[in-house]
Amino acid sequence: MKNLLSKKIRVAFVREDLVALTKDTNKAIALNQFIYWSERMRDVDQYIEEESMRLKRGGIDANLSPSHGWIYKEAEEFIQETMLTISRPTANRIRGCSESYATY
């Protein structure tokens, strides 16, 4: 029990609106995960822009490129994050790719 309490608890949400849209619980969970990461990438791009400007003022060319909303996830990482009990090929189909990794 002590190990369980010391581990970070993962959470996956099933949103009713996304289930209605996709007509599939797994796809709804996947879509929710993509929405979550797309929001995080906006934060990352803003941070990259702010840091680039700060470094430029200090005379340093950081050469940092924004992500432009692209998200890189391997199938195993996607399965682990969503806690879906699916195979890698199924994860790839849900993510819309044929490789074990995907960039969105």
Image (cartoon, helix red, strand yellow):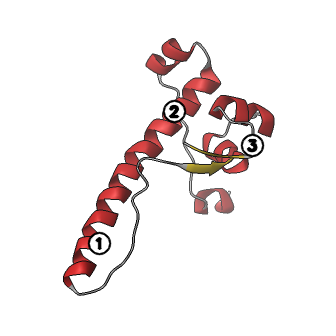
User: Which three-letter amino acid code belongs to the residue tagged 3?
Assistant: Glu
Residue 97 to residue 26: above or below: below
> Of callouts 2 and 1, which one flags the residue occurring earlier in the amino acid sequence?
2
Q: Residue tagged by mark 2? A: 13
Instruction: In the displayed orientation, state which residue is furthest to the bottom.
Output: 59
The Cα atoms of the two marked residues, 3 and 2, are separated by 25 Å
Residue visible at 56% across and 57% down in the picture: 8
- Say which element carries label 3: loop
Nearer the camera: disc 2 or disc 1: 1
Q: Does the rendering let one see residue 103?
A: yes
Residue 102 to residue 85: above or below: below
User: Which three-letter amino acid code belongs to the residue tagged 1?
Assistant: Glu
- Say which element carries label 1: helix
Residue 99 circle label: 3
- Say which element carries label 2: loop
Residue 75 to residue 97: above or below: below
x, y percent for residue 41: 41, 51
x, y percent for residue 89: 79, 35
User: Which three-letter amino acid code belongs to the residue tagged 2?
Assistant: Phe
**Quadrant housing residue 97:** top right
Residue visible at 65% across and 56% down in the picture: 4
